[in-house]
Amino acid sequence: MKVRIEIDTKTFVRFWLVVIAFALAALAIYSARTALLIVGISFFLALALNPPVNWIAKHMPGRSRVGGTAIAFVLVVLVLSTFLVLVTPPIVEQTAKFAQAAPGFVDTATDKYKALDDVIQRYDLQPQVDSAVNSIKNNATSWAADFGQILATGVGSAMKFLVAALIALVMSFLMLVEGPAWLERLWRLYRDEKKMKQHRKLLTKMYSVVSGYVNGQLMVSAIGAGMSALTVFVLSLFFDIPAGLAMPVFAITFVLSLIPMFGATIAGVIITLLLAFNNLTAAIIFIIFFVIYQQVENNFVSPVVQSKAIELSALAVLIAATVGIYIFGILGGIIAIPIAGCIKVVLEEYLNTRPDGPKSKKPILKKLAHKATESN
C-alpha cells in the first residue's frame, strides 16, 4: 500500500527558510564566539559584583550607584594587585631554582646514558640510537626556526588577552551602572501587567541561579585554595620547601578550580610538579591530601554550597561544561553551567505556564488520587 503525502510549495519553502535561518544563526554565533565570551564574562562579573555594589551605593551620600561601582572596582583592582605582588616573587624564585638545578638533571641523565651505553654496545643498538638522535636534531632545528614565529604569536595572544580583559572590565562597569535603568525601561514597555510580572519573576529566578552559582563557585574555589595553601605551608615546616610557595599554590588552585569538572585536577598536577622540584616526599603527601580533599569537596562542600543555586544533574553539568569548553575554550566551561541553569529555569517556566502544562493537570491528578483513596 502506497501512501502519498502532498506538501504545498509555500510550506516547503517555509521549512527550508527556517532551516537556513537556524544554520546562519549557528554560524553567526560560532563566528562571534570570542565577542560573546567577553560579553558573557562581563555579565557574570557584573552579577558577582552587584551585591557589594548595591550595599556600597546604599551607604553612600546620595546613593550614587556610579560611586558604589567605582569603589567596588577599585577594591577589586587593589586585591588583584596585592595578590600579584605576593604571588610573583615565589614563582620567579622557583623558576630560578629549577634553572639552577637543570645542569644537575643533565649530569644525572648523562650518567644514566653512560650506564646504558654498555647495553647498547652489547645488543648492537647503535644504529637505532643514532637514527633517533638525528631525528631529534632535525626536529630541534625545525623548532628553532619556528621559535620566532611562536614567540610573536605568544606576544600577540598576550596582547589580545589584555585587551579582552580591559574590555570585559569596562563592560562590567557599564552593566553595573546602567543595568537597573535598562531594566526599568524594559518593564515600562509592557502593556500587559500580568505578563510583565511573570517575566520579571522569571528574570529574578535566572538572576538567582547565575549569582548563586558564581558566588557559590567562588566560595568553593576559595575553600579548596585555602586548604591547598595551608597544606603546603604545613609541609614547609617539615620538608625543604619554601613557605612562600603557599601563595602561588593558592592562586593556581583558586583560578583553575573555577573551571568545572577538570580545573581542580589540573591545579593538583601543577602543584605536585612544583613540590616535586623541591621534595619528592612532600609531593607524594600532597597528592594523598589532594585526592582525599577532592572526595570531600565533591561529596560534601560543593553540594552544600551549590545545591540551592543550580539544580542540575551530574550528567547535565558534564554536558554543559564539555560543550562550553569545546566551543568557547576554558572560560566557556566556566559560564556554560549557569547558562544551562538559566535554560532549565526557562523550560520549567514554559512547561508550567502553557495551557496544557502541569499546572492544568494537577487538579485532575488530585481528583483521581482522591477517588482512588475513597475507593480503598
Image (tube, rainbow, N blue to C red):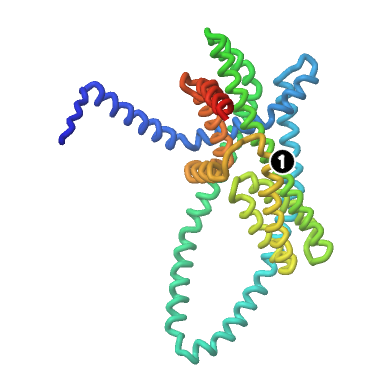
Quarter of the image containing the N terminus?
top left
Front-lying residue, 282 or 287: 287
Q: Determine the secondary structure under disc 1.
A: helix
Residue highlighted by disc 1 = 219
Q: Where is residue 230 in the image (x, y as percent from the top left)?
A: 79, 54
Front-lying residue, 200 or 58: 200
Residue 206 is left or right of residue 236, and the answer is left
**Which image quarter: residue 340?**
top right
Task: Identify the residue shown where x is 75% and y is 39%.
Answer: 79
Residue 169 in sight here: no
Q: Is residue 351 above or below residue 240?
A: above
Q: In this view, does 251 lie above or below 359?
A: below
Residue 8 is left or right of residue 236, and the answer is left
Q: Where is residue 333 in the image (x, y as percent from the top left)?
A: 55, 43
Q: Position of residue 291 (x, y in %)?
A: 68, 58
Task: Identify the residue shown where x is 57% and y is 42%.
Answer: 313
Q: In this view, does 161 lie above or below 230?
A: above
- In the displayed image of the protein, which residue is found farthest to the top? 191
Q: What residue type is labelled 1?
A: Met
Q: Position of residue 170 (x, y in %)?
A: 62, 29
Q: In this view, does 295 lie above or below 130?
A: above
| Crowd tier of the residue under label 1, counting other residues whose Cα lies within 10 Å: few below 14, some 14–19, many 20 or above | some
Quarter of the image containing the C terminus?
top right
Residue 98 in sight here: yes
